[in-house]
């Protein structure tokens, strides 16, 4: 059956989750999916990762929250979200109507909160997996981010693992000395996949007013500027763990996406590019087929991790 | 709500003043769906510097499928835009956001300051569709100087509106501040529409509140997506919660936001 | 004396070293100074930091060594340099003729090597200070970079401190979880100043050949892309230590430079910008005077660290 | 050694083939100091994408202060360059690097492939300054097809050189490979100058070595600075040490580098 195998050429798996293609949209850059429904054919996407959800609604940071930088942007949204209950009642009705896997990005202030929210989402119709944002401060540990201490990251992973049967993807913070240590810790604690990178911490100043450009002073750097760092980390992590890795960071074109797949990513997420080029995910999906053809490969799985580092 | 991503051919670009340009593009889908007060997100370059799209109000719209923008060059993006030439292709997303509610009662007062006048031209034209006599309405326009203001005033006069003006340097109309002109007309109007510098709108909203006249304002904030997805465009709402300018606005009733 | 005070408006100090203005050129981006002598008035610069010098000459990495990225570049030069002896005999004759402070960037494989090279440079005519690049792997500690472990960074700092009377500036690596820990460690160990940031570790892949674009696979990311990260780290470090901080990372315009000074840097270094805009350092120096005028300040020291982070 | 950073006005830009352009700029300082085989670093945009300057050989030079570049559009930078218009300003640094040694003995053989022909035009003209008769020399030029090759051949013919050609598709001259033409002339020449694809130059260097004819080649590598400062432009030298193409080259004797 040529047709069937043909449609499977881009198929990849993250744990028990099968994606029709490796191209997802990144948390916080695609709203709850609906925001892009006029511009993007949501049914073509490999998956949709929704804006980070916490147990209770969060108002987010005061404005200004965003600023453009060289080939990138800083955001300090402050994890504004409707909270898990309203997410289920208000946002899932649209999302569960889609034929595309929906992955819910979750966050918390404490290990318990991560566990509770994962538990609450377990069994909700239309949710295919959880992505755990561990770049948040652990309020019980003086605000040190979960994602910067392997033990804390492992504890969160374990708590989420206990609380749900859904596939869980741990999303790593790049603001660490040794990303491989972090990745190994969450792999051992039961993660089904690892996504990286979240934003780099950055800052910008208005020299006229002598004030920070973000009310929150610091924010997360995203966009093409960070791609080289993201790619390096994905390569390091994919070489060190045996669970699937999802590459994120500045991906705009199919060439960007293929760099991540060659480096070992099983799938990728398009983030900031959704803002300046909403057609990016669909263009990448189309381009992947052409890339396979050019390279004389039959399916995308034959590309993953095939970077030739020898001479 | 319909929105389109459209590759648009530049039909004309005219320099109106030293740093003000009027750009017309062929955007049949966006133009057909546009409502006054809505905006478009323009990709000014296909490279990554500048990276983000730039928001601009819809200034003019024609049934022939053209869309007009009026903009001032203030930085990287607007300077690139000012250098486009006829025939170039620009990528636009729109129409976006919530526009003005078209008031059927009269008279209304339209108050614009600087580039804030841009969306009011489209508004003024659309208001006429409901067999309104523009002579009864009031239009108060202000800008830095005659050079900047005069071509915009002509647009309203061509539609039949009476226009009062003020300029910072006194080179056209009253020397000074637009809101001062409002006091005389406010008792008679049923609705105020305004767009301009934040301090100006703040005063107007307060005057309208005191006079119990309904007032719609169009706000500006930095925007990454214009689609309600990034949550970057917040301003504090009147109820202490944040509102998102790109979806809940850019047009708000004066009482909806904190001033 | 108006003239005298006028020329001092941009003067800053790093330990015992006085710079006529805060604008230096960054190591590895300005050769040994002479390379730019046709294009830049070297006498106007606040200081020149030369290419990193090791005890013995190093051949560097095989090509390709550089690749352009979005608003940045990756380099894997591999610390090619002529070694300390040839540096002194071949390069110092030109440099000592300059009326501009020359800071020698040094690097090593071991604590001992850092000490030896610092000792060798002590007392050499024309050298005003040392900048210690600790982003190098410690071969005795399995190749972990000195700059990623506070204790190792402190040990290197102590060894250099012992070996020279010159002012010493420790150059920090940004590839760490907590830059403030690193800064405090080297401050305590006797550094006269701290410069940051060195390059972020990144990677790029040629999807056609499926090979890394750098022969060394990974390399250092520099240029405007990294400015937000550099600025954030400078702000964090300047808020935490009491020795002068030198800001580096993507600085191209006077506005960039002022962001770093507002964040607390006493001086700055122009790096990658020397490649695409050799006039950048001189334009920044000129622009600083105009900025002072616009802000109604009399001297640059009144700007340093005056970022208003309150509301 | 003198080098200049010069803001240059674009005097002309001509499309020579589908993806080949000849650009002329006013660069009096660089033009006056230029020697054949040297190059310039061009800032193609004043934004940060693309960030680095692009290296181009000096293709033509006039005492009137103009400088000609010949380039093929292969990526971001060259595509931006192809879109400049007369009167635009471009920032150039040059003349950079070590050029060809001008051989006084004759005959010489000039061999160019594709865009490698660019610096050889300047070389061919300068060689004539030492009262040389170009008829005795040999010029072998190759490219993909007639469209690309023909205008370049004209430049040499205008100077009086005899030219032999080869194209990949056989549309002009010999169908096939330039080095094949060399065997017939090599015994008679005292010097070979070549610039073109690396595999072509490798064969030529080897043929020259066997025939004991001195050969100068012009190399290409990725460059960040062009000034000898970044150490990014290395290739392995014949002695196992690295050489820096921007300062020790771009022109080398065949025996100086590892092939
Ligand atoms: C809904 C809306 C409608 C607008 N309509 C118009 C119009 O009709 N005519 C007009 O001249 N301007 C209008 N503006 C402002 C216009 O978007 C900015 O002038 C423009 O983005 C500046 O871009 P720049 O690259 O030249 O400036 P830069 O300062 O270089 O831009 C840097 C960043 O800041 C953002 N930014 C800077 N100034 C503003 C601003 N005032 N508002 C929002 N973002 C800003 C840019 O979008 C960019 O992300 C509107 C803004 C909004 C939000
Ligand atoms: C000394 C020298 C002289 C040259 N002379 C000419 C000439 O006369 N005519 C001409 O058409 N080309 C010439 N080249 C090649 C020219 O520099 C590249 O084609 C050009 O840099 C490509 O830029 P891009 O942005 O279009 O390509 P991209 O591939 O987008 O460039 C990405 C990066 O790779 C570099 N790069 C890509 N290809 C090359 C290459 N072949 N050589 C060096 N760097 C490259 C670019 O400079 C840039 O940094 C010369 C190169 C060198 C080193
Ligand atoms: C405006 C904005 C909001 C974001 N919100 C979240 C979030 O809620 N949860 C999360 O895990 N990541 C969040 N991210 C990070 C992105 O998902 C992504 O990891 C990062 O932006 C890097 O990818 P990019 O360069 O493609 O944008 C956000 C990013 C942006 C720009
Ligand atoms: C080509 C190149 C070579 C470099 N070599 C050195 C070096 O030898 N020693 C060092 O401490 N830093 C070196 N650096 C780092 C720079 O000094 C600087 O810290 C970094 O590039 C960030 O600044 P920038 O973004 O302004 O370039 C090098 C950077 C580049 C681009
Ligand atoms: S601009 Fe993105 S949510 Fe409003
Ligand atoms: S290009 Fe920088 S040293 Fe040659």
Image (tube, coloured by chain):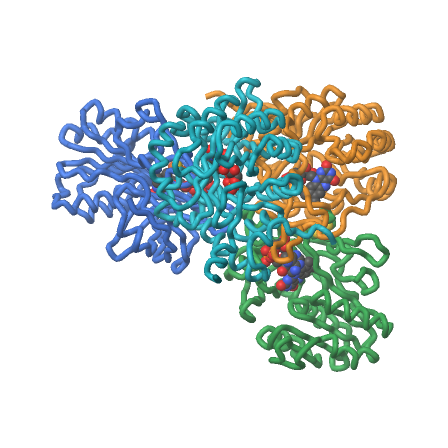
Chain colours: A cyan, B blue, C orange, D green
Q: Position of residue C5 (x, y in %)?
A: 64, 25
Is residue B29 left or right of A151 when viewed as pictured? left
For the point 64% across and 34% down, which residue is it?
Answer: A184
Is residue A303 left or right of D255 when viewed as pictured? left
Front in this rendered view, residue C169 or D42: C169
Above or below for C30 versus B184 = below
Is residue D3 left or right of A73 when viewed as pictured? right
Q: Quadrant of residue C55?
A: top right
Q: Position of residue C22 (x, y in %)?
A: 65, 31
For the point 38% across and 59% down, which residue is it?
Answer: B86
Front in this rendered view, residue B94 or D61: B94
Q: Position of residue C124 (x, y in %)?
A: 85, 33
Q: Quadrant of residue C154?
A: top right
Q: Is residue C127 at least partly visible in the picture?
A: yes
For the point 50% across and 56% down, which residue is it?
Answer: A287
Q: Is residue D1 at least partly visible in the picture?
A: no
Name the quarter showing ligand 5.
Answer: top left
Q: Position of residue A266 (x, y in %)?
A: 56, 46
Tell me the quarter of the image containing the C terminus of chain A. Answer: bottom right
Q: Residue furthest front?
A: A1
Figure label count? 0
Front in this rendered view, residue D245 or D86: D245
């Amino acid at each position: 059956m040529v047709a069937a195998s043909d449609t499977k050429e881009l198929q990849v798996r993250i744990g028990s989750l099968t994606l029709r293609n490796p191209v997802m949209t990144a948390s916080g850059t695609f709203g709850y999916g609906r925001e892009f429904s006029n511009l993007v054919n949501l049914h073509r996407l490999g998956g949709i990762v929704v804006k980070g959800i916490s147990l209770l609604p969060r108002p987010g940071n005061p404005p200004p929250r965003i600023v453009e930088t060289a080939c990138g942007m800083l955001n300090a949204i402050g994890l504004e979200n409707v909270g898990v209950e309203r997410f289920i009642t208000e946002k899932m009705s649209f999302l569960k109507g889609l034929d595309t896997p929906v992955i819910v990005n979750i966050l918390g202030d404490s290990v318990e909160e991560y566990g509770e929210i994962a538990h609450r989402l377990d069994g909700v119709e239309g949710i295919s997996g959880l992505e755990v944002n561990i770049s948040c401060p652990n309020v019980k540990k003086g605000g040190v981010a979960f994602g910067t201490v392997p033990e804390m990251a492992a504890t969160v992973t374990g708590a989420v693992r206990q609380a749900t049967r859904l596939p869980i993807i741990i999303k790593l913070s790049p603001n660490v000395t040794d990303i491989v240590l972090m990745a190994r810790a969450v792999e051992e604690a039961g993660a089904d996949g690892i996504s990286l990178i979240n934003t780099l911490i950055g800052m910008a100043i208005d020299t006229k007013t002598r004030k920070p450009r973000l009310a929150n002073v610091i924010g997360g750097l995203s966009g093409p500027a960070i791609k080289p760092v993201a790619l390096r980390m994905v390569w390091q992590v994919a070489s060190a763990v045996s669970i699937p890795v999802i590459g994120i960071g500045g991906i705009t074109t199919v060439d960007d996406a293929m760099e991540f797949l060659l480096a070992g990513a099983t799938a990728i997420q398009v983030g900031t590019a959704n803002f300046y080029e909403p057609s990016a995910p669909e263009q990448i999906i189309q381009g992947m087929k052409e890339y396979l053809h050019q390279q004389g490969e039959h399916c995308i799985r034959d590309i993953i991790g095939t970077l030739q580092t020898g001479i | 709500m319909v929105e389109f991503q459209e590759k648009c051919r530049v039909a004309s670009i005219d320099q109106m003043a030293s740093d003000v340009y009027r750009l017309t593009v062929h955007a049949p889908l966006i133009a057909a769906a546009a409502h006054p007060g809505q905006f478009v997100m323009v990709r000014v370059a296909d490279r990554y510097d500048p990276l983000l799209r730039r928001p601009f109000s819809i200034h003019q719209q024609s049934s022939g499928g053209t869309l007009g923008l009026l903009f001032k060059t203030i930085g990287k993006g607007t300077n690139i835009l000012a250098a486009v030439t006829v025939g170039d292709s620009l990528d636009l997303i729109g129409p976006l956001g919530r526009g003005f509610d078209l008031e059927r009662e009269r008279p209304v007062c339209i108050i614009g300051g600087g580039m804030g006048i841009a969306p009011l031209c489209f508004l003024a034209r659309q208001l006429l569709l409901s067999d309104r006599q523009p002579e009864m309405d009031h239009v108060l326009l202000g800008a830095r100087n005659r050079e900047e203001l005069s071509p915009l005033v002509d647009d309203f006069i061509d539609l039949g509106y009476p226009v009062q003006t003020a300029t910072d340097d006194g080179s056209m109309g009253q020397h000074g501040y637009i809101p001062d002109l409002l006091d005389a007309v406010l008792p008679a109007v049923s609705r105020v529409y305004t767009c301009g510098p934040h301090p100006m709108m703040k005063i107007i909203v307060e005057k309208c509140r005191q006079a119990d006249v309904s007032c719609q304002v169009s706000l500006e904030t930095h925007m990454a997506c214009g689609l309600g997805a990034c949550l970057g465009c917040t301003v504090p709402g009147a109820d202490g919660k944040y509102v998102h300018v790109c979806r809940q606005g850019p047009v708000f009733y004066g009482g909806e936001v904190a001033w």
